[in-house]
Amino acid sequence: MTTAATPALQRGRQLHPLHVRRATVSRVEPLDGRMRRVTLDLEAGAPPIPWVPLAVGDHVKVAFPHPSTGELILPTVVDDRPRLPEGASRPVTRDYTVRGVEDARPDGSQQVSIDLVVHGTGPASTWANSAGPGDVVGLLGPRGSMTEPSDARRYVLLADETAIPAIGRWLEEAPAGIPLEVVVQVPDASCLVPLPQRDGARITWLMDEMDTTLAQALRDLPPAQGDYVWAAGEAGAMVQVRRAAAELGVGGEALQPSALQVDGYWRRGVAGRDHHEPLES
Protein backbone atom coordinates (compact mmCIF):
# COMPACT_ATOMS: atom_id res chain seq x y z
CA MET A 1 0.00 0.00 0.00
CA THR A 2 1.33 3.45 -0.92
CA THR A 3 1.22 6.19 1.71
CA ALA A 4 0.47 9.71 0.50
CA ALA A 5 3.41 12.04 0.78
CA THR A 6 3.48 14.47 3.69
CA PRO A 7 2.61 18.01 2.52
CA ALA A 8 5.50 20.46 2.14
CA LEU A 9 3.79 23.05 4.39
CA GLN A 10 5.82 26.05 3.30
CA ARG A 11 4.93 29.63 4.20
CA GLY A 12 5.16 32.34 1.54
CA ARG A 13 6.62 35.81 1.98
CA GLN A 14 5.65 39.03 0.25
CA LEU A 15 7.25 42.40 1.05
CA HIS A 16 5.42 45.76 0.93
CA PRO A 17 6.78 49.31 0.80
CA LEU A 18 6.35 51.24 4.02
CA HIS A 19 3.49 53.73 4.12
CA VAL A 20 2.27 56.01 6.90
CA ARG A 21 -1.42 56.84 6.81
CA ARG A 22 -3.89 58.90 8.82
CA ALA A 23 -7.19 57.22 9.57
CA THR A 24 -10.40 58.39 11.22
CA VAL A 25 -12.63 56.25 13.39
CA SER A 26 -16.03 55.76 11.77
CA ARG A 27 -17.46 53.05 14.02
CA VAL A 28 -16.73 51.22 17.29
CA GLU A 29 -18.52 47.95 18.07
CA PRO A 30 -18.25 45.93 21.30
CA LEU A 31 -17.55 42.26 20.58
CA ASP A 32 -17.48 41.09 24.20
CA GLY A 33 -16.69 42.46 27.63
CA ARG A 34 -13.08 43.34 26.67
CA MET A 35 -12.82 43.50 22.89
CA ARG A 36 -13.79 46.32 20.55
CA ARG A 37 -13.90 46.33 16.75
CA VAL A 38 -12.75 49.71 15.49
CA THR A 39 -13.49 50.63 11.89
CA LEU A 40 -11.13 53.22 10.41
CA ASP A 41 -11.49 55.28 7.25
CA LEU A 42 -8.18 56.05 5.55
CA GLU A 43 -7.86 59.60 4.33
CA ALA A 44 -8.58 60.09 0.65
CA GLY A 45 -5.59 59.29 -1.53
CA ALA A 46 -3.81 57.23 1.12
CA PRO A 47 -2.09 54.09 -0.19
CA PRO A 48 -4.34 51.10 0.48
CA ILE A 49 -3.40 48.54 3.08
CA PRO A 50 -2.54 45.27 1.33
CA TRP A 51 -4.98 42.42 1.77
CA VAL A 52 -3.32 39.05 1.18
CA PRO A 53 -5.54 35.96 1.65
CA LEU A 54 -4.28 33.50 4.28
CA ALA A 55 -1.77 36.04 5.62
CA VAL A 56 -3.62 35.80 8.93
CA GLY A 57 -0.86 37.48 10.92
CA ASP A 58 -0.74 40.66 8.81
CA HIS A 59 -0.65 43.60 11.16
CA VAL A 60 -0.34 47.36 11.22
CA LYS A 61 1.26 49.59 13.81
CA VAL A 62 -1.40 51.88 15.21
CA ALA A 63 0.04 55.22 16.35
CA PHE A 64 -2.02 56.89 19.06
CA PRO A 65 -2.37 60.59 19.86
CA HIS A 66 -0.45 61.91 22.84
CA PRO A 67 -2.55 61.03 25.92
CA SER A 68 -2.20 64.54 27.42
CA THR A 69 -2.17 66.89 24.43
CA GLY A 70 -4.18 64.79 21.98
CA GLU A 71 -1.63 65.70 19.29
CA LEU A 72 -0.80 63.04 16.72
CA ILE A 73 2.70 63.39 15.27
CA LEU A 74 3.48 60.88 12.55
CA PRO A 75 6.74 60.14 10.76
CA THR A 76 7.29 60.55 7.06
CA VAL A 77 8.92 57.84 4.97
CA VAL A 78 12.48 58.48 3.79
CA ASP A 79 14.30 55.68 1.93
CA ASP A 80 11.61 53.22 3.07
CA ARG A 81 12.22 54.08 6.73
CA PRO A 82 10.10 56.21 9.11
CA ARG A 83 11.56 59.59 10.05
CA LEU A 84 10.05 61.93 12.64
CA PRO A 85 10.27 65.71 12.49
CA GLU A 86 13.34 67.03 14.31
CA GLY A 87 12.75 67.20 18.04
CA ALA A 88 9.49 65.25 17.90
CA SER A 89 8.86 62.37 20.28
CA ARG A 90 7.89 58.99 18.91
CA PRO A 91 4.16 58.31 19.26
CA VAL A 92 3.03 55.29 21.24
CA THR A 93 2.39 52.43 18.81
CA ARG A 94 0.95 48.95 19.15
CA ASP A 95 0.62 46.13 16.61
CA TYR A 96 -2.85 44.95 15.61
CA THR A 97 -4.02 42.30 13.17
CA VAL A 98 -5.69 43.63 10.03
CA ARG A 99 -9.11 42.04 10.56
CA GLY A 100 -10.71 43.26 7.35
CA VAL A 101 -10.55 45.84 4.57
CA GLU A 102 -13.20 47.39 2.36
CA ASP A 103 -12.12 49.23 -0.77
CA ALA A 104 -15.49 50.47 -2.03
CA ARG A 105 -15.78 53.74 -0.08
CA PRO A 106 -17.74 56.53 -1.87
CA ASP A 107 -14.70 58.84 -1.87
CA GLY A 108 -12.40 56.09 -3.10
CA SER A 109 -10.64 55.65 0.25
CA GLN A 110 -10.20 52.34 2.05
CA GLN A 111 -11.90 51.22 5.24
CA VAL A 112 -9.97 49.02 7.65
CA SER A 113 -11.13 47.14 10.75
CA ILE A 114 -9.04 46.09 13.74
CA ASP A 115 -10.04 44.35 16.96
CA LEU A 116 -8.55 45.64 20.22
CA VAL A 117 -8.57 44.04 23.66
CA VAL A 118 -9.34 46.64 26.32
CA HIS A 119 -7.61 45.88 29.61
CA GLY A 120 -5.76 47.88 32.22
CA THR A 121 -4.82 51.54 31.83
CA GLY A 122 -2.15 51.46 29.13
CA PRO A 123 -2.21 54.04 26.33
CA ALA A 124 -3.75 51.69 23.77
CA SER A 125 -6.44 50.35 26.12
CA THR A 126 -7.26 53.83 27.38
CA TRP A 127 -7.67 55.06 23.82
CA ALA A 128 -9.74 52.05 22.74
CA ASN A 129 -12.01 52.35 25.77
CA SER A 130 -13.03 55.90 24.86
CA ALA A 131 -12.60 55.88 21.07
CA GLY A 132 -15.45 57.20 18.99
CA PRO A 133 -16.26 58.48 15.50
CA GLY A 134 -13.98 61.31 14.43
CA ASP A 135 -10.95 60.25 16.45
CA VAL A 136 -7.74 60.09 14.41
CA VAL A 137 -4.83 57.61 14.57
CA GLY A 138 -1.87 56.74 12.39
CA LEU A 139 -1.37 53.41 10.61
CA LEU A 140 2.10 52.17 9.61
CA GLY A 141 2.69 49.06 7.50
CA PRO A 142 2.35 46.22 7.07
CA ARG A 143 5.95 45.77 5.93
CA GLY A 144 5.28 42.28 4.66
CA SER A 145 2.85 39.38 4.47
CA MET A 146 3.49 35.78 5.47
CA THR A 147 0.96 33.45 3.86
CA GLU A 148 0.23 30.23 5.69
CA PRO A 149 0.49 26.85 3.89
CA SER A 150 -2.55 25.96 1.84
CA ASP A 151 -1.81 22.23 1.59
CA ALA A 152 -2.11 21.01 5.19
CA ARG A 153 -4.33 18.03 5.92
CA ARG A 154 -5.44 19.67 9.18
CA TYR A 155 -4.85 23.03 10.83
CA VAL A 156 -4.31 22.99 14.59
CA LEU A 157 -4.74 26.55 15.87
CA LEU A 158 -4.00 27.68 19.43
CA ALA A 159 -4.58 31.24 20.60
CA ASP A 160 -5.21 33.46 23.55
CA GLU A 161 -7.51 36.47 23.54
CA THR A 162 -5.09 38.72 21.66
CA ALA A 163 -4.93 36.32 18.70
CA ILE A 164 -8.70 35.97 18.25
CA PRO A 165 -8.66 38.34 15.23
CA ALA A 166 -6.18 36.05 13.47
CA ILE A 167 -8.35 33.03 14.37
CA GLY A 168 -11.28 34.82 12.72
CA ARG A 169 -9.23 35.17 9.56
CA TRP A 170 -8.21 31.51 9.69
CA LEU A 171 -11.85 30.47 9.83
CA GLU A 172 -12.73 32.69 6.88
CA GLU A 173 -9.68 32.12 4.67
CA ALA A 174 -8.41 28.57 5.15
CA PRO A 175 -8.88 26.46 2.00
CA ALA A 176 -12.19 24.64 1.78
CA GLY A 177 -12.21 21.00 2.77
CA ILE A 178 -9.35 21.20 5.31
CA PRO A 179 -10.50 20.63 8.91
CA LEU A 180 -9.58 23.12 11.63
CA GLU A 181 -8.99 22.24 15.27
CA VAL A 182 -9.19 25.54 17.16
CA VAL A 183 -8.43 26.09 20.85
CA VAL A 184 -8.82 29.58 22.31
CA GLN A 185 -8.04 30.55 25.91
CA VAL A 186 -9.77 33.56 27.47
CA PRO A 187 -9.90 34.90 31.04
CA ASP A 188 -13.58 34.05 31.63
CA ALA A 189 -16.94 33.52 29.92
CA SER A 190 -17.52 37.26 29.44
CA CYS A 191 -14.66 37.25 26.91
CA LEU A 192 -16.22 34.72 24.52
CA VAL A 193 -16.34 36.30 21.06
CA PRO A 194 -18.62 35.21 18.19
CA LEU A 195 -16.40 33.56 15.57
CA PRO A 196 -17.12 32.93 11.89
CA GLN A 197 -18.99 29.70 11.21
CA ARG A 198 -17.21 27.12 9.09
CA ASP A 199 -17.86 23.50 8.17
CA GLY A 200 -15.16 21.20 9.45
CA ALA A 201 -14.03 23.51 12.26
CA ARG A 202 -14.15 22.44 15.89
CA ILE A 203 -13.70 25.28 18.37
CA THR A 204 -12.83 24.69 22.03
CA TRP A 205 -12.84 27.54 24.53
CA LEU A 206 -10.64 27.35 27.63
CA MET A 207 -11.19 29.53 30.68
CA ASP A 208 -8.22 30.50 32.83
CA GLU A 209 -9.90 29.09 35.91
CA MET A 210 -10.09 25.67 34.26
CA ASP A 211 -6.31 25.37 34.77
CA THR A 212 -5.80 23.91 31.32
CA THR A 213 -3.02 25.42 29.25
CA LEU A 214 -2.80 25.71 25.50
CA ALA A 215 0.28 23.49 25.64
CA GLN A 216 -1.70 20.77 27.39
CA ALA A 217 -4.54 21.17 24.90
CA LEU A 218 -2.03 20.49 22.13
CA ARG A 219 -0.75 17.39 23.91
CA ASP A 220 -4.32 16.13 24.28
CA LEU A 221 -5.00 16.32 20.53
CA PRO A 222 -4.15 13.12 18.65
CA PRO A 223 -1.48 14.15 16.12
CA ALA A 224 -1.92 13.31 12.45
CA GLN A 225 0.36 13.37 9.43
CA GLY A 226 0.05 16.61 7.53
CA ASP A 227 -0.86 18.73 10.59
CA TYR A 228 0.07 22.38 10.53
CA VAL A 229 0.26 23.84 14.04
CA TRP A 230 -0.15 27.60 14.43
CA ALA A 231 -0.13 29.31 17.81
CA ALA A 232 -0.07 32.93 19.00
CA GLY A 233 -0.46 34.65 22.34
CA GLU A 234 1.49 35.45 25.51
CA ALA A 235 5.18 34.68 24.93
CA GLY A 236 5.69 32.57 28.05
CA ALA A 237 2.70 30.40 27.18
CA MET A 238 3.97 30.11 23.61
CA VAL A 239 7.31 28.73 24.84
CA GLN A 240 5.34 25.93 26.47
CA VAL A 241 3.36 25.35 23.27
CA ARG A 242 6.57 25.08 21.27
CA ARG A 243 7.95 22.53 23.72
CA ALA A 244 4.74 20.53 23.55
CA ALA A 245 4.90 20.59 19.74
CA ALA A 246 8.44 19.22 19.88
CA GLU A 247 7.06 16.17 21.69
CA LEU A 248 4.55 15.42 18.94
CA GLY A 249 5.20 12.71 16.43
CA VAL A 250 3.35 10.57 13.93
CA GLY A 251 4.55 7.14 12.93
CA GLY A 252 7.87 7.75 14.67
CA GLU A 253 8.44 11.02 12.82
CA ALA A 254 8.73 14.31 14.68
CA LEU A 255 6.71 17.34 13.62
CA GLN A 256 8.72 19.00 10.87
CA PRO A 257 9.87 22.59 11.66
CA SER A 258 7.95 24.00 8.69
CA ALA A 259 4.75 22.54 10.17
CA LEU A 260 4.94 24.78 13.25
CA GLN A 261 4.49 28.55 13.58
CA VAL A 262 4.51 30.06 17.09
CA ASP A 263 4.33 33.81 17.75
CA GLY A 264 4.57 35.69 21.05
CA TYR A 265 2.21 38.63 20.59
CA TRP A 266 2.88 39.99 24.09
CA ARG A 267 4.63 39.18 27.35
CA ARG A 268 3.11 39.42 30.79
CA GLY A 269 4.46 42.48 32.61
CA VAL A 270 6.10 44.00 29.50
CA ALA A 271 4.50 46.98 27.74
CA GLY A 272 4.79 47.26 23.97
CA ARG A 273 6.86 44.10 23.45
CA ASP A 274 8.03 43.60 19.85
CA HIS A 275 6.50 40.31 18.76
CA HIS A 276 9.45 39.76 16.40
CA GLU A 277 11.70 39.17 19.41
CA PRO A 278 12.56 35.57 20.36
CA LEU A 279 9.97 33.96 22.62
CA GLU A 280 12.44 33.64 25.47
CA SER A 281 13.43 37.34 25.44
Image (spheres, grey):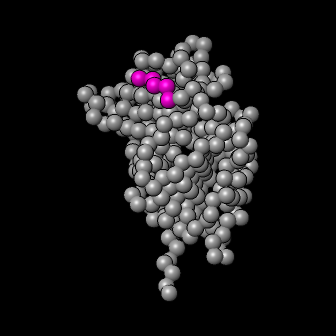
Where is residue 4 drawn, in percent x and y? 48, 78
- 70 or 85, which is in the foreground? 70
Where is residue 170 drawn, in percent x and y? 47, 49
Q: Is residue 2 left or right of residue 209?
A: left
Q: Which residues are magenta?
A: 27-31
Q: Give the residue displayed 72% in from the left and 58% down from the top.
A: 243
- 2 or 260, which is in the foreground? 2
Question: Is there any visible trace of residue 81 in the rendered image?
Answer: no
- 96 or 21, which is in the foreground? 96
Magenta stretch: dominant secondary structure: strand
Question: Is there any visible trace of residue 197 in the rendered image?
Answer: yes
Please identify the residue farthest to the left as the structure is shown.
106
Q: Is residue 135 above or below residue 223?
A: above
Q: Give the residue displayed 50% in from the left and 33% down from the top.
A: 115
Where is residue 113 drawn, in percent x and y? 43, 33
Q: Give the residue displayed 50% in from the left and 19% down from the top.
A: 131
Please identify the residue farthest to the bottom as the structure is shown.
1
User: Is residue 212 part of the magenta span, yes or no?
Assistant: no
Q: Is residue 258 above or below residue 187?
A: below
Please state the total of marks drawn on the protein image.
0
